[in-house]
Structure formats: structure tokens, C-alpha cells
Image: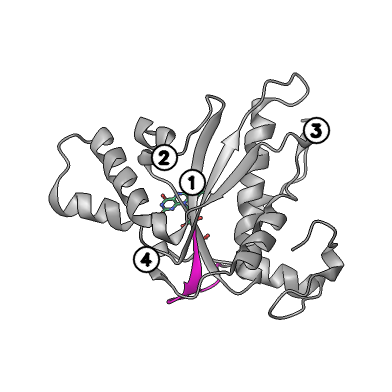
Amino acid sequence: MSSTETASDIEAPGEKVDGLSLLRRIWERRSTAPRHLVAAGPSEDEIRMIVRAASRAPDHMRLKPFRFLVIPADARESLADVFEAAECELDPGIAGEKLERAREKALHAPTLLAVISRVQERDEVPEIEQRASAGAALGYLLLAADLLGYGAMAVSGGKVATTAMRRAFHLADNEALLCFVGVGTPGKSKRALPEPDPALLQAWSRE
Ligand SMILES: Cc1cc2nc3c(=O)[nH]c(=O)nc-3n(C[C@H](O)[C@H](O)[C@H](O)COP(=O)(O)O)c2cc1C
């Protein structure tokens, strides 16, 4: 995608959706666990489209309080070493099958992205807003993957905050690894969830 292209120039694969169809897709979206994601994953152009959608998250003062990394296919074994080191940091006694499962998590899903949240000191934009913006970016990213016909899921675990992981991802002091997102073709799909509890939306009253 060139930098001069506008949204309307882009011919996305798959169904062209009107507003209501788009809403239905959002209502029905479910996550697919990375171990159930099979090839093919998104192409490089599709990954750019997904990240472009994420970049449109609400962002007070355009601080861009998030960034993304794609884990190249030939770096997955190296990531597995980092996952292993992170789990050992959390549980120095870990061994055998548990360690093998920790490594496997780096190898699941055809495409693996990392979502990094970043907070800058700004009086006008408190930390909660910047964290919310990163969360919204994650949401848009998941929706964009879904709209392109892929399954995806955000996964984290205690390992994302370990020193091993922070070092391997070269995180600055004001950054945190929010989660990984596995993207691929769903080998298994889940049923849509029922409508939300009506109590989700209530009228405000000062009384
Ligand atoms: C930042 C973040 C990290 C998450 N990490 C995990 C995780 O490590 N393991 C897990 O089972 N679900 C995790 N989840 C939840 C799943 O991604 C997913 O939202 C949840 O299973 C609900 O599934 P649904 O999207 O189909 O409703 C995480 C969600 C977020 C927003």
C-alpha cells in the first residue's frame, strides 16, 4: 500500500459490506485460540491493512500510545526461547511438558503480532486515556482481521511483563507489552454470543 493511497482506493478481498452488515459482523465476532488457527495467515498487504485499521483508534492529541511488531516466521523459534526464559523467570522450577507447552505458544498461529502500549507524560492526556487508546487499537485490529476473513485472538499471560520479555522486545521504560495477537484461518469456529445484558446500558441519573 503506498502512502498516497486513500481508503477508497483500496480493494479489500472478501465481501463488500454496508453499515448493517458490518455491525452484524462485529456483533458476531469471536476469538479463535492460536492453537486453532491454521494456514493461511494474512499477506503482508493484509497485515498492513489490519494495522491501518488499528491506527484509527481514538487517540487524544495523536500521541499514538501503541505500536505493533510482527514476528517473522523465521524468528518463531527464537521467540520460543524467549517464552521459555520468561516462564523460567516466573517459575524457576518449571520443566518438562510445562516448558514445552510454553515454547509451543510461540509457534501457534500462522501470523503473530505483538501489541505494545506506550504512555507519555502529558497533563492533557492522563494515563488511563492512553491505555484505553491502546485497548481500542487492539479491538480495531481484531475486527479488521475478522473482516478480512481471518480468526484472531489476543493472548498474554504473566510472561508479557517479565524482564526476559521486556528485554527481548527492547521495551522503553514507558512501554508495556499488552499482548500477542495470533491471526490465521480458523480451524474451528465458535458460536456468536447472545445479546448483552440490558443492564449494560442505563440512563444516567444524579439521584
Ligand atoms: C489484552 C488481552 C489479553 C488477553 N490474554 C488472554 C490470555 O492470555 N488467555 C486467554 O484465554 N484469553 C485472553 N484474553 C481474552 C481473549 O482474547 C478473548 O477476548 C476471550 O477469550 C473472549 O473471547 P471472544 O472474543 O470470543 O468473546 C485477552 C484479552 C485481552 C484484551
Task: Give the mark, 3 or 1, whose residue is nearer the N terminus.
Answer: 3
Q: Which residues are magenta?
A: 182-193
**Taking 156 as reference, is 110 above or below it?**
below
Task: Provide the secondary structure element on which disc 4 rests.
Answer: helix
C-alpha distance separating marks 1 and 2: 7 Å
Task: Give the mark, 2 or 3, whose residue is nearer the N terminus.
Answer: 3
Whole-percent x, y for residue 32 in the image: 47, 66
Task: Give the mark, 1 or 2, whose residue is nearer the N terminus.
Answer: 2
Quadrant holding the C terminus: top right
Residue occupied by mark 3: 61
Task: Provide the secondary structure element on which disc 2 rests.
Answer: helix
Task: Give the mark, 4 or 1, whose residue is nearer the N terminus.
Answer: 4
Q: Does residue 53 appear to the left or right of 162 in the view shown?
A: right
Please tell me which residue is depicted at 52% across the width and 24% down the height of the picture. Answer: 173
C-alpha distance separating marks 3 and 1: 24 Å
Q: Amino acid at mark 2?
A: Val
Task: Give the mark, 4 or 2, whose residue is nearer the N terminus.
Answer: 4
**Taking 1 as reference, is 122 above or below it?**
above
Residue occupied by mark 1: 179
Q: Amino acid at mark 1?
A: Cys
Please tell me which residue is depicted at 85% across the width and 62% down the height of the picture. Answer: 6
Please tell me which residue is depicted at 48% across the width and 50% down the height of the picture. Answer: 180
Quadrant holding the N terminus: bottom right
Residue reaching furthest to the bottom: 15
Residue occupied by mark 2: 160
Whole-percent x, y for residue 188 in the image: 43, 76
Mark 1 CB near ligand 1 (8 Å cut): yes
Can residue 21 be seen in the rendering of this structure? yes
Residue occupied by mark 4: 35
108 and 139: which is toward the camera:
108
Answer whether residue 190 is magenta in the image: yes
